[in-house]
Amino acid sequence: MREGQPLWESLERTGYISEMAVEMVKVGESTGSLVEMLDNASEFSEEEIDYRLSNMVTMIEPLMLVFMAVIVTGMILAIYMPLFQAVGQSKF
């Protein structure tokens, strides 16, 4: 920006910002509505992050349920196995 280059070129060179956001900044600079385009880009990015996060949580939930089922089954077996063994060894 100090050298007089457009903001979108600097953002594009960094590689940290998505192509869609760079294009929105480019349009905002050329039309003179950079503030509005930056607001739109931030809203778009927030919606995209929310969507990806909800997908990730949706995929992780079944794995958490299976993991908890294994833990609970292990605890139940740890409690009942000694009882079953004691009853099996006793002679009435």
Image (cartoon, rainbow, N blue to C red):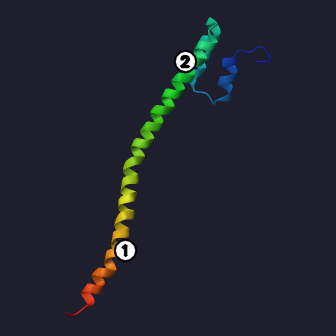
Q: Residue at x 35, y 60 (%)?
A: 69
Q: Determine whether 55 is above or below 41 in the image.
A: below
Q: Specify the label residue 67 is tagged with.
A: none
Q: Front-most of 11 and 71? A: 71
Q: Specify the label residue 78 is tagged with.
A: 1
Mark 1: few/some/many CA within 10 Å (<14, 14-19, 20+): few
Q: Residue at x 27, y 90 (%)?
A: 89
- Quadrant location of residue 36? top right
Tags 1 and 2 in contact by the CB under 8 Å rule? no
Residue 87 at x, y percent in the picture: 25, 85
Residue 30 at x, y percent in the picture: 63, 8
Mark 1 or mark 2, which has the lower sequence index? Answer: 2
Extreme-front residue of the structure: 92
Secondary element type, mark 2: helix
Q: Is residue 46 left or right of residue 13?
A: left
Could you tell me the amino acid type at mark 2?
Answer: Asn
Q: Determine whether 44 is above or below 59 in the image.
A: above
Secondary element type, mark 1: helix
Extreme-left residue of the structure: 92
Q: Residue at x 55, y 18 (%)?
A: 40
Callout in the foreground (1, 2): 1
Mark 2: few/some/many CA within 10 Å (<14, 14-19, 20+): some
Extreme-bottom residue of the structure: 91
Extreme-top residue of the structure: 31
> Between marks 1 and 2, how big is the CA–CA gap?
56 Å
Q: Determine whether 83 is above or below 37 in the image.
A: below
Q: Specify the label residue 40 is tagged with.
A: 2
The quadrant in which the N terminus is found is top right
Q: Front-most of 55 and 92? A: 92
Q: Is residue 31 left or right of residue 76?
A: right
Q: Is residue 37 left or right of residue 62?
A: right
